[in-house]
Image (cartoon, rainbow, N blue to C red):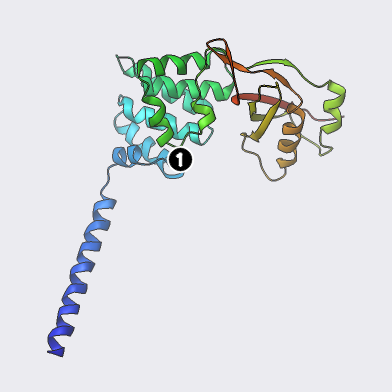
Amino acid sequence: MRGRTILYFALASISLGACSQGSSKGEAQLTPAQACLQTLDPATGVDACKTAIAADQNNAALRRRMGLLRLKSHALSAARQSYQVAINLDPNYEPDAQFGLGLTLEAIGEPGANLRKLDAVKHDPAVVDRFRKDGISEPDLMTFDTAPRIVGGASPAADKLLIPKQPLRQGLSVDVRCLVGLNRRLHDCIVTTPLTTDQAVFGEAAKKILAATRVEPARDKDAPVADAPIALTYVFWPQG
């Protein structure tokens, strides 16, 4: 009886091992297109999408996913190009590509980006939920008919006091994303430009300098919108 029990467990172990190997093989057999469309991680998805697009350059779905992955990694120029190509490839109005392009242009700070998002939602309100599931933050999912507008800021002399003394060989552009309160003040600012460890001090300085900016809140149907996002940029130049 004991011998049968041992044999049973041995056979079960072999069976489970075979299933495990079959599962691994199944996962390894994903095509580049499947890997591209099934991931939300730019670290692995971008390369898969590049391979898939090289084999099928006119696939709008692949271009849209590449746009999303580029947007999530803040490679905004690449995201913009991917979404624009996706829109050109699709003969019909594609709300996901339009909303994604609006998100990208809004992150860049281009005027009118909010209207593109608003138009996409009018065509398909469910587009917001799809981007929410894709990991886009709630402030970015907001829609409004009038974007936030800069109305004032600190003086150049005040800005100069916050500029790091650390030397620069060339100009350094730092992008900062903030939320606009109803009191025209910015809050929850984050640096979106990838910076090296040596450049981090400039990122913190940019947040402090730009926090003094006064911004008229976004408006929707003529009512102010609390905590809409705005993209701002500060450029540091070599001193001397």
Residue 214 position within the rendered picture, expressed as x and y whole percent measured from the top left: 73, 20
Could you say which quadrant of the image residue 109 lies in? top right
Residue shown at 73%/38% (left/top)?
A: 204
Report the side of 225 relative to 94 (left or right).
right
Q: Residue at x 64, y 18 (%)?
A: 217
* Residue ranking furthest to the front: 223
Q: Quadrant of residue 37?
A: top left
Between 29 and 231, the one lying in front of the other is: 231
Instruction: Give the residue displayed 16% in from the left and 84% down from the top.
Output: 5
Quarter containing the C terminus: top right
Q: Is residue 132 left or right of residue 152?
A: left
Name the outermost residue toward the top.
Answer: 222
Is 238 in front, or is 162? Answer: 162
Give the amino acid at mark 1.
Answer: Pro
Residue under label 1, please give it.
42
Residue for point 56% across, 12% down: 146
Q: At which x and y percent is residue 209?
A: 77, 29
**Crowding at label 1, few (<14), some or many (≥20) Cα neighbours within 10 Å?**
some
